[in-house]
Image (cartoon, rainbow, N blue to C red):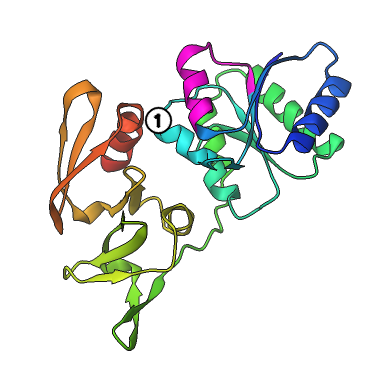
Amino acid sequence: MKVLIIEDEAPASRRLQKVLKEIMPDVQILEVIDTVKDSIAWFDSHVMPDIVFMDIQLADGLSFEIFEEIEISSPIIFTTAFDQYAVKAFEVNSVHYLLKPIDKGLLEKGLKKLSNLRTQPNVDIAELLKSLQDKTKIYKERFLVSFREELLSVSVDDVSCFYTEHGNVYVITDQGKRYPVNYTLDHLEVELNPKQFYRLNRQHIAHIGSITSASVYENGKILIKLKHLKDALIFVSREKSSSFKEWFGS
């Protein structure tokens, strides 16, 4: 089995490699990468591995940013010290989610799950992965914002979009009012209902009702126009275009 490891912490990487070789003596570790940037470059120039072990918090950002640039067809086992990203992990090709320190028994369970998925006939892997998501997930319904000296509670139903500007994150309501929010877009992406909201790129998360137009642009990108950001040039990358079309048309 050919394995790629994307891991920021050297001790964790060494532990994972040791346990993998105990379970599968003939495993081939293709490379160990510790940044989002280098991961994107690797996938852009190599054949997909049999499996990817991926930490979530890397040296230069969250590993979910990799999926904004590259479409990864390999199954993924996430390894992390944090459990708040579990639901989001299963939105990509994740077959298992391991908390650090890596437990040999749990790792064997994850590899067995992958083996079972591959050997079952007539199985839609994408549907199986979706079924692993936590169906009891409760998404955020309101956001506390401040306006001058006043605290306001904004219903998620009144949100048009979230976006970043000069390092700050703002919410724009359906009425066109803008307020700063004390959340990162990475955190918001996990807390928002994915049926209603989509992470267009690193700077924008949009409610489906805020999109006034979506058109094919050069190099396979999609140009998005939002209701209250009419002058902004907002693009969905070529790698995410299929995902966006599926979300926008569902």
Image height check: is 149 above or below 22? below
Please state which of residues 116 and 92 is positioned toward the viewer in this rendering. 92
Is residue 91 at all visible to an observer of this figure? no
Q: Is residue 12 left or right of residue 228?
A: right
**Magenta span:** 37-51
Image-based side of 163 in relation to 53, left or right:
left
Quick one: 243 or 189, which is closer to the camera? 189
Q: Position of residue 92 (x, y in %)?
A: 51, 36
Quadrant hosting residue 200 = top left
**Whether residue 219 is visible:** yes
The amino acid type, in three-letter code, at marker 1 is Glu
In percent of width and height, residue 186 lies at 46, 52
Mostly what secondary structure, the magenta segment? helix
The percent position of residue 232, horizontal first and vertical second, equals: 16, 48
Q: Point out the residue furthest to the right here.
A: 22
Q: Position of residue 131 (x, y in %)?
A: 55, 41
Q: Is residue 227 left or right of residue 50?
A: left
Look at the image and say whether residue 39 sits in the magenta stretch. Answer: yes
Image: 172 above or below 214: below
The C terminus: image quadrant: top left
Residue at x 85%, y 26% (from the top left corner): 18
The residue that label 1 is drawn on is 69
The quadrant of the rendering that contains the N terminus is top right
Q: Residue at x 48, y 26 (%)?
A: 40
The image quarter containing residue 11 is top right
Few, some or many residues within 10 Å of mark 1 (<14, 14–19, 20+): many
Horizontal side of 83 relative to 106 (left or right) equals: left
Q: Element at badge 1? A: loop
Whether residue 189 appears in magenta in the rendering, the answer is no
Measuring 53% from the left and 41% from the top, which residue is drawn there? 60
**Extreme-front residue of the structure:** 166
